[in-house]
Image (spheres, rainbow, N blue to C red):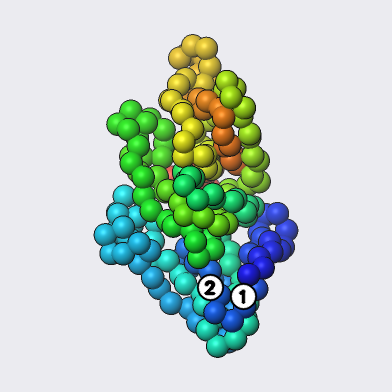
Amino acid sequence: MKCEIIGDTAFPMLRAELGKGESIKAESGAMVAMSDTVHLTGKAEGGIGKALGRMLLTRESFFLQNLHAKEGPGWCLLASATPGEIAAVEVEQGRHLVVQKGGFLAGTTGIEVASKMQGLGKGLMSGEGFFVVKIGGHGTVYLATYGSIYPLTLGKGEEVVIDNGHLVAWDGDMQYKITKGAKSWMGAMFTTGEGLACRFYGPGRVLIQTRNPQQLGAWISPYIIFPRRG
């Protein structure tokens, strides 16, 4: 299988070239176009129980799309609902990636999509809720971000503080805790808006996005509540 990210950085698409018998899985509604040799079906990833957990706990779709080149070689185009980049991330066997809700776009057949429970404190304060998306198995996962994506690779002993709304994904074996975004809580409230951030400890990788959907919602809300006239 050959996958290529095409289009501009704000509104890209993922083009997958499938050989006969190959398939790719994607988030429900991601398919934009496909050749007539590709069959599109819905699949409860991991069985009914895991699919229900993914839908109820992380607000992801119950069914994932399965695009299968059954009769011969074919292609398909996939896209995210939000403006921003698509990033390819490799997942190794025996390790997993933790992804924000709505961040999963597509993955090769070896990728497994499930839900993961956070601790009580992290669930209440991280902005992600008690459950996040867990990407396991092995292969390539394609993540959809709001804005551009930027990887941070931490060595052993290194730390980084990230605003919650800019988090996309991180290695599942990384240690992290919820902290204030500045030295004092008063400073944190004025500098981060919500006063909370995540402190990650290396080694490992963290993917961040350049735009914050929470800030977009705060910017839009006055226009929805008090629409302009004229």
Q: At x 57% / y 57%, what residue is drawn?
A: 140
Where in the figure is residue 19, as x and y percent of width and height?
A: 62, 78
**Residue 104 appears in the picture as rendered:** no
Count up the numbered dots.
2
Secondary structure type for disc 1: strand
- Dividing the picture into quadrants, the one containing residue 139 is bottom right
Pick the residue in front: 159 or 163.
159
Q: Are marks 1 and 2 in contact (CB under 8 Å)?
A: yes
- Determine which residue is flagged by label 2: 23
Where in the figure is residue 110, as x and y percent of width and height?
A: 49, 61
Left/right placement of residue 41 relative to residue 31 reads left
Q: At x 54% / y 63%, what residue is drawn?
A: 108
Where in the figure is residue 56, as x and y percent of width and height?
A: 30, 54
Q: Amino acid at mark 2?
A: Ser
Pick the residue in front: 96 or 88.
96
Left/right placement of residue 224 relative to residue 34 reads left
- Dividing the picture into quadrants, the one containing residue 16 is bottom right
Where in the figure is residue 57, as x and y percent of width and height?
A: 31, 50
Question: Which quadrant: the N terminus?
Answer: bottom right
Q: At x 42% / y 56%, what residue is drawn?
A: 113
Q: Earlier in the sequence, mark 1 or mark 2?
A: 1
Q: Give the number of the disc on residue 18.
A: 1
Q: Residues within 10 Å of mark 2 (few under 14, many from 20)?
A: many
- Give the CA separation, mark 1 to mark 2: 7 Å
